[in-house]
Amino acid sequence: MYLRRVIGSGASEERITRLIEERLEADDEARERIDRRIWDLFGEEWAIVFTDLSGFSRNVEAFGIIHFLQTIYESERILVPVIDEHDGILLKMEGDSMLIIFRNPQKALRAAARMQAACVEYNRDRTDEEKVLLCVGVGYGKVLLIGDADVYGREVNSASKLGEDTAGSGDILVTQAVVDAVKADGGFSFRPLAEGPASVGAAYHYDYME
């Protein structure tokens, strides 16, 4: 299974690379055709979750690289089982951040809430410097998913901006597209974000209860 997964990712990356190379040499009309081919091949609807750890850089400077590695290890240990339980896919980790995708936006929100709850449980008996303080941003919509390697699109950028740059510890911030996708489900409550990133547009606090 591992070998098949690597081959699948490699084939996707090879195909997108060839198409981008063709696009570089194409005129405007040909570029439009290539763009349609790319979206036909790789365009899918996913919920995108970006996580970040609040105050992480300050803690690294104060407590050193070993503390950095310990916090990364502990965050992965407590959060990955929650991702798996809610049918999420952890695409990659970069430093203290996770990029996770979910087919179902409701599951993405429930997973985010449970991840916050898992951090609260973990932190209960920890010193301040040992606590895992989670910030989360969520987007939803049409994206380009390249194998199991990476994902691209406006909602990816928005989720990253909300999770990494805007959210505070304990926050789950979502885009308008997320609110629209789950509004028929009465199980979710949102508050408009008073001042969010201009590049994201309307954004909301998800008022989760765990």
Image (tube, rainbow, N blue to C red):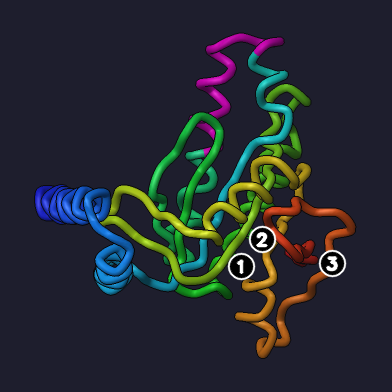
Q: Residues within 10 Å of mark 3 (few under 14, many from 20)?
A: some
Classified by dominant secondary structure, the portion drawn in magenta counts as helix
Residue under the point 71% across and 81% down: 187
Query: Does 127 appear above or below 172?
Result: above
| Mark 3 or 1, nearer chain start | 1
The x, y position of residue 122, in whole percent, is: 66, 40
Query: Does 25 appear above or below 155?
Result: above
Q: Which mark is residue 113?
A: 2
Residue range highlighted in magenta: 61-75
Residue under the point 40% across and 43% down: 92
Query: Callout 2, which amino acid?
Result: Ala
Report how far apart the C-alphas of labels 3 and 2 lie in the structure.
18 Å
Q: For residue 43, what is the image quadrant?
A: bottom left
Q: Which mark is residue 192?
A: 3
**Are discs 2 and 1 less than 8 Å apart at CB?**
yes
State the SS at label 1: helix
| Mark 3 or 2, nearer chain start | 2
Position of residue 192 in the picture relative to residue 23 (left or right): right
State the quadrant of the C terminus. bottom right
State the quadrant of the N terminus. bottom left
Nearer the camera: disc 3 or disc 1: 3
